Amino acid sequence: MLNPGGVRIGTAEIYRQVEQLDEVVESIMIGQNWQSDVRVVLFVKLRNGVVFNDELQTRIKR
């Protein structure tokens, strides 16, 4: 559970959505102290041969 800006985020909910993308093998989120708050950083492990580009980034964000 992360709590950036006072908003509770269940990481499992995010993992479940992101890992439905064929390009993503697994993912992990961390909270990072940032400018007097906490930001959420998402790391993804991509399948072999997949290139991280703007299109994939947009799909992950959605």
Image (cartoon, rainbow, N blue to C red):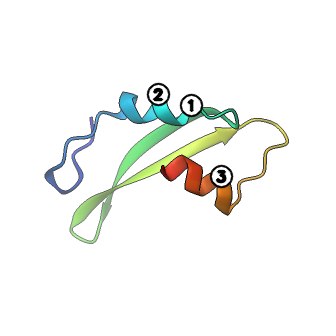
Q: Secondary structure at mark 2?
A: helix
Kind of residue sitting beneath label 1: Glu
Which sits in the foreground, 24 or 55?
Answer: 55
Amino acid type assigned to the residue bearing label 3 in the image:
Leu
Around disc 2, counting alpha carbons within 10 Å, would you say few (fewer than 14), some (14 to 19), or many (20 or more)? few
22 or 7, which lies in front? 22
* Residue wearing tag 2: 16
What residue is disc 3 on? Answer: 56
Task: Single out the residue that lies furthest toward the right.
Answer: 49
Counting every numbered tag in the picture gives 3
Q: Are marks 2 and 1 in contact (CB under 8 Å)?
A: yes
Question: Which residue lies at the image location 41% right of the left edge and 36% below the top edge?
Answer: 14
Q: CA distance from mark 2 to mark 1?
A: 6 Å
Residue lying at 36% horizontally and 34% vertically, measured from the top left:
11
Picture coordinates of residue 43, whole percent (x, y): 54, 46
Examine the rendered structure and indicate whether residue 3 appears above or below residue 19: below
Q: Secondary structure at mark 1?
A: loop
Say above or below: 43 vs 34.
above
Q: Amino acid at mark 2?
A: Arg
Is there a contact, CB below 8 Å, between mark 2 and mark 3? no
x 69%, y 32%: residue: 22
Tell whether label 1 touches label 3 (CB within 8 Å). no
Residue nearer the viewer, 6 or 60: 60
In the visual, does 3 lie left or right of 39? left
Q: Which residue is mark 1?
A: 19
- Compared with residue 18, is residue 54 higher up or lower down, i.e. above or below? below
Sequence-wise, which precedes: disc 2 or disc 3? 2
